[in-house]
Image (tube, rainbow, N blue to C red):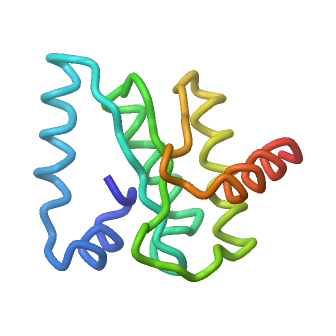
């Protein structure tokens, strides 16, 4: 899942199957433990609205784990805004009892910067 709101989902994917994806996530989460991955696309899905929408999805499907990742193809440095949103989402999910990890493929410097921001929240 790359976002919470339908509009951002359609923008990223190029089509709108948001409801179908949410139904499938709910269906599979009732059968087994699932993991969700949120891939941050700077300036695309790193807003408060995106974070709030994703948290609502998480509340509905109760994943065993959420993995936060960045777009591996985007080589631009992450903005302070995106890092703050990543830290904020991590804290919001942690506060709801959802385990959160950063992708093993994420740059260690980025992970350290996210941890610093989380400490300030």
**Corner quadrant of residue 106:** bottom right
Image coordinates for residue 21, horizontal then vertical, percent = 16, 50
Image side of residue 1 versus residue 74, left or right? left
Percent across and percent down for residue 75 are 52, 79
Between 115 and 98, the one lying in front of the other is 115
The answer to which image quadrant residue 91 occupies is top right
Q: Position of residue 4 (x, y in %)?
A: 39, 56
Quarter in which the C terminus is drawn: top right
Residue 121 vertical placement versus 7 (above, below): above
**Quadrant of the rendered structure where residue 8 is?**
bottom left
- The spot of residue 104 in percent (x, y) is 50, 44
Q: Is residue 31 left or right of residue 86?
A: left
Rendered residue at 81%/52% (across/down): 117
Residue under the image location 20 percent in, 32 percent down? 26
The image shows residue 46, relative to residue 31, as above or below, that is below
In this rendering, the count of numbered labels is 0
Q: What residue is rendered at 31% in x and 73% in y?
A: 7
Name the residue: 20% across, 37% down: 25
């Amino acid at each position: 899942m790359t976002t919470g709101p339908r509009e951002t989902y359609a923008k990223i994917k190029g089509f709108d199957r948001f409801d179908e994806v949410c139904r499938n996530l709910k269906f599979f989460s009732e059968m087994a433990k699932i993991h969700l991955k949120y891939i941050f696309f700077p300036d695309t899905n790193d807003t408060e609205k995106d974070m709030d929408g994703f948290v609502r999805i998480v509340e509905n499907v109760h994943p065993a784990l959420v993995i936060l990742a960045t777009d591996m193809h985007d080589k631009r440095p992450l903005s302070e805004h995106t890092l703050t949103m990543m830290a904020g989402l991590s804290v919001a999910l942690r506060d709801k009892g959802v385990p959160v990890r950063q992708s093993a493929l994420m740059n260690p410097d980025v992970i350290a910067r996210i941890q610093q921001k989380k400490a300030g929240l």
